[in-house]
Amino acid sequence: MKALFTICRLGAQDKVPNVDTVITSPDLQKICYRLTGQRKYVVEWKEQRIKGKMFTFETDNCKYYITYTPKEVGGRNSYLQSVPTAFGLYLNEAYNSNKKCRFCLYITPTNGGNQTRYHKFMYGLLFSMGVVFLNADEGLSGFSIKPYDSVRDLIADREANSIRNSANQSSYITDEGQFYHVYGKTFGANQKETTMLCLALCGISDKPVRLFQIADNDSEYLSDADIDAIKNYARERGRAQIEILNDTYEFDEDDNHTYKPVSADESLRSPRFIYNLLEKTGGHKICSLCHCEIESIIQGAHIYPIQAIKQRTDLPFAEKLKMATDGNNGLWLCENHHKLFDRGLIRFEKGKLEIMPKLNENDTAFVNLISPYPEIEHNYYTSMMSEYFKKRDAFYRSEKIY
């Protein structure tokens, strides 16, 4: 057969330019030559709306699913937001195809802005998913891109981006020992970044992955199409399986990360608390008192306890949930310090560690020994935290824990 492009000509929406104004004959000739070494092809234009900015290119033995970038970079999340949709369509069709199938990215000419550090991270995710870059030498000239060899490298890049762009993060990854946890926003273009992150993790992870979807602003969770794409990829092509959970689960980070589904108006132990704490600390989990960085033993400790918030009959549930998930109502503590904190054996006074007199001399010496950083860092300690510490002290005294 002659090399055949099949392209839906109409833009995805009325306000979106038609495809033939973006992908022109020189583009098609270039794609054909790079995939086959030939320049002859035919095009079948369909008067239908395109999905995922994706069209196909077919030869006797191969079928290529090609998605393309917009000519304007726009917001940092929007530039590649069609990729998950296209990738999901590709996975569904390729599974039943009798031809060799590949998923490709074609980078349309732009005026720049697509080579930021953040974009490099996203390109690394695509490489890790197995995406073929058709013209990286032109569209990303001089820009080094490679797949991630390990989740640790991916996390390091993610954290580096978090530090540079702390005001606009959509997802965080933590290593919890037996699992990797992803806390990902699902509103706006952020949901597409979360989807690509999960696809890449399934491709390179050495252990199972859990995604906790963090909804906000009355947004919905990931679309069924994105969830299907992630699960299909994990099942058919990935190294790791994935659980996809939402933020209405009763989540207990203190107890081996157990969770159970509850109705949205019952749970105060939402994974949103961990997300907000990660957001406050740039995605970095480190014990406030000993600076231990072994993520699997670093826990999010509530300052004003959930037990106390539940007992507040003067507050509506929405206000209780706000307090329970507030990043200022928490700090990272290792398992030892968390237990000491929850049992009232240590407290904080104006951000400084205070060891309670109920401990004997030897125990006090031990706590001092394992707490070489006895003051919460000033750039982390806030006036809101101070208020939560006051509420905690009042509750602990009323419960005779102090």
Image (cartoon, rainbow, N blue to C red):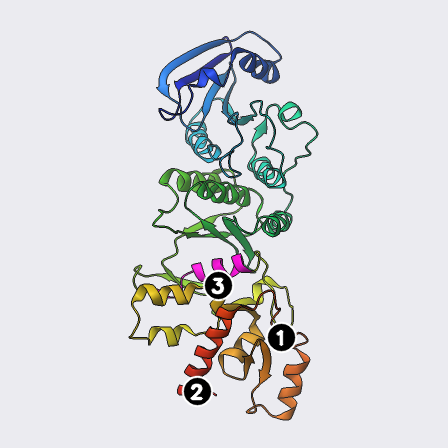
Direction from residue 202 to residue 250 in the image, left or right: left
Q: Which residue is mark 1?
A: 375
Callout 3 crowding tier (Cα within 10 Å): few <14, some 14–19, many ≥20:
many
In the image shown, does 189 or 366 lie closer to the viewer? 189
Residue 334 in the image: state x and y as whole percent: 58, 70
User: What residue span does the magenta drawing correspond to?
Assistant: 267-280
Q: Which labelled disc corresponds to residue 327?
A: 3
Residue at 46% of width from left, 25% of height from top?
A: 54
Residue 178 drawn above or below residue 338: above
Q: Which residue is mark 2?
A: 397
Mark 1–mark 2 Cα distance, whole angstroms, equals: 22 Å
Mark 3–mark 1 Cα distance, whole angstroms, equals: 18 Å
In the image shown, does 167 or 152 lie closer to the viewer? 167
Residue 322 in the image: state x and y as whole percent: 38, 63
Residue 43 in the image: state x and y as whole percent: 46, 10
Check disc 2 and give the amino acid type: Arg
Mark 3–mark 2 Cα distance, whole angstroms, equals: 24 Å
Check disc 3 and give the amino acid type: Gly
Residue at 47% of width from left, 79% of height from top?
A: 390
Q: SS class of the residue under badge 3? A: helix
Q: SS class of the residue under badge 2? A: helix
Residue at 61% of width from left, 38% of height from top?
A: 124
Residue 197 in the image: state x and y as whole percent: 52, 44
Q: How many marks?
A: 3
Q: Residue furthest right?
A: 142
Asked whether the residues under the numbered discs 3 and 1 touch, taking CB atoms below 8 Å apart as contact, a structural biologist would say no
Asked whether the residues under the numbered discs 3 and 2 touch, taking CB atoms below 8 Å apart as contact, a structural biologist would say no
